[in-house]
Image (cartoon, rainbow, N blue to C red):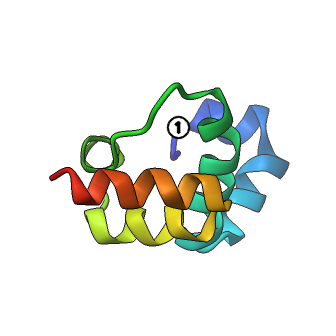
Amino acid sequence: MHHTLVRKQYPDQVAAAERMTLDEALDQFLQVSLPQAIYANPPILAKDLKLPAATLYTALERMSPLSSQRVNHSRSSH
């Protein structure tokens, strides 16, 4: 998020985002995104986010038990 207009329009949000660790950012993203999702395909999501799959799996495992079951099911089916 380096676009000048975003920085000018949302300086507080940009500053907050820059203070986040990768784990914090992933947790926040997943907490907002997963409840709206019908399903999540971790390998494809990791590729789309340009993250190692292991990083995404770790973030998903920090989520609720239901999300953890989905991840474990996805791992066993591949």
The crowd level at tag 1 (other Cα within 10 Å; few <14, some 14-19, many 20+) is few
Q: Is residue 2 left or right of residue 46?
A: right
Q: Is residue 60 left or right of residue 32?
A: left
Report which residue position mark 1 lands on. Answer: 3
Q: Residue at x 65, y 34 (%)?
A: 6
Q: Position of residue 37 (x, y in %)?
A: 55, 28
User: Please, what secondary structure does the residue beneath circle 1 have?
Assistant: loop
Q: Residue at x 51, y 46 (%)?
A: 2
Q: Residue 73 versus residue 16: which sits nearer the camera? A: 73
Compared to residue 9, the image places residue 28 above or below, namely below
Compared to residue 18, the image places residue 10 above or below, namely above
Q: Residue 32 versus residue 2: which sits nearer the camera? A: 32
Number of numbered tags placed on the structure image:
1
Q: Which residue is outermost to the left?
A: 78
Compared to residue 69, the image places residue 5 above or below, namely above
> What kind of residue is marked 1?
His
Q: Residue 69 versus residue 61: which sits nearer the camera? A: 69
Q: Position of residue 42 (x, y in %)?
A: 34, 49
Q: Is residue 76 left or right of residue 18?
A: left
Q: Which residue is outermost to the right?
A: 12
Q: Residue at x 42, y 38 (%)?
A: 40
Q: Position of residue 64 (x, y in %)?
A: 68, 60
Residue 34: quadrant of the picture: top right
Q: Position of residue 63 (x, y in %)?
A: 63, 62
